[in-house]
Amino acid sequence: MSFIRTLTKDIDPKDLGFTYSHEHIVCRPQHWVDRGADDLLLDDPAKSQKDVQIFKDLGGNSIVDATAVDYGRDVAAVNQIAQATGVQIVGTAGFNKGLLWDAKRPDADETYEEWISRSTVDQLTDYVVNEVEHGMNGTTLRGGQVKFGTGYNSISPLEEKTIRAVAQAHLQTHAPIHSHTESGTMALEQIEILKQEGVDLHNVSFGHMDRNPDTWMHLKVAETGAYLSFDGIDKIKYYPECVRIHCILELVRHGYQKQILIGGDTARKSYYASYKNGPGLGFIIGKWVPRFREEANEAGFDGQQLIEDFFINNPRECFSFKL
């Protein structure tokens, strides 16, 4: 038996449809609020909804919102967008990364760092389990995946604590795991910790793999059975699109097309069409998909089948609770 947990309800995996595997829809990270970093605040739900509607109108069905509690998650606002547009949205329990933990928690007179420092792994596990089984941010809206993250080329002791807590929450709830890797680093080191906790890596997706376009590393991750999320589509400031597509096709060439996920990680106003005339949530389905299909066909692959795997078949498997 398996199901996918959206904010609205649990659904049969076959009903997930065309899916972006890593986005942000409404978020107000206190770390960035404190620094006046307005571009990193998706703080107008009406504008966010316009982009979600564009995605829907172009044929999109579901979005995985990877916003954890320390990234200013607002599940009530996101759920209203899901209800208004009909887009199925998967919410995220757990944590992001240590960089954000100097900020005050909205529900307590302490920082995230202070909270994680004083808590045991078991206590943090219970927190994440509660988000999956009962609700997030004081609501009854439950998380459909559990998340942890680490910094650039490093894993701090507190980040390791959250990895172990999220791993144990996964083992208790069967919720799929998502990993934030800063600039695509430390995935292999995270894997070693997850193995210690007894996690089947086929239940894990590793984010930001295209921020580190190292095919050797990608293949090592893929060999474990894990999913690789290429979620920086159209962020040319990092790499041109040809680099991402090359990395993806190399994985396909080695037989890993069933472990690839695609998203845009739209965590800035400047990425949204409705906030600042950016590419928006319509870009991948409207422009990137046709380009990728064309390049894959030219390289001798079945481009349409790859698109169906990346956006329909692979998310359906990756984001399932497998009981």
Image (cartoon, rainbow, N blue to C red):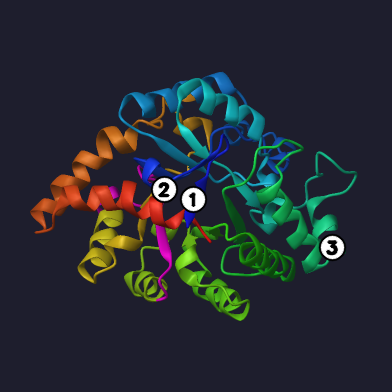
- Res. 3 mark: 1
Q: Which residues are magenta?
A: 224-242
Please state the horizontal and vertical placement of residue 1, each as a whole percent of the image: 47, 57
Under mark 1, the amino acid is Phe
Under mark 2, the amino acid is Pro
The foreground one among 279 and 237 is 279
Is residue 182 part of the magenta span, yes or no? Answer: no
Mark 1 neighbour density, 10 Å: few (under 14) some (14–19) many (20 or more):
many
Residue occupying image coordinates x 64% and y 70% = 155
Disc 2 designates what residue?
13
Kindly tell me whether residue 283 is visible in this rendering.
yes
State which mark lies toward you, 2 or 3: 2
Kindly tell me whether residue 320 is visible in this rendering.
no
Please state the horizontal and vertical placement of residue 272, each as a whole percent of the image: 46, 29
CB of mark 3 within 8 Å of CB of mark 1? Answer: no
State which mark lies toward you, 3 or 1: 1
Residue 228 placement: quadrant:
bottom left
Q: Is residue 305 left or right of residue 104?
A: left
Under mark 3, the amino acid is Ser
Residue occupying image coordinates x 35% and y 52% = 239
Residue occupying image coordinates x 60% and y 44% = 67
N-term-proximal mark, 2 vs 3: 2
Residue occupying image coordinates x 53% and y 24% = 83
Above or below, comparing residue 119 to residue 281 in the picture: below
Disc 3 designates what residue?
119
Numbered disc 1: secondary structure: strand
Mark 3 neighbour density, 10 Å: few (under 14) some (14–19) many (20 or more):
few
CB of mark 1 within 8 Å of CB of mark 2? Answer: yes
Magenta stretch, main secondary structure class: loop
The foreground one among 10 and 129 is 10
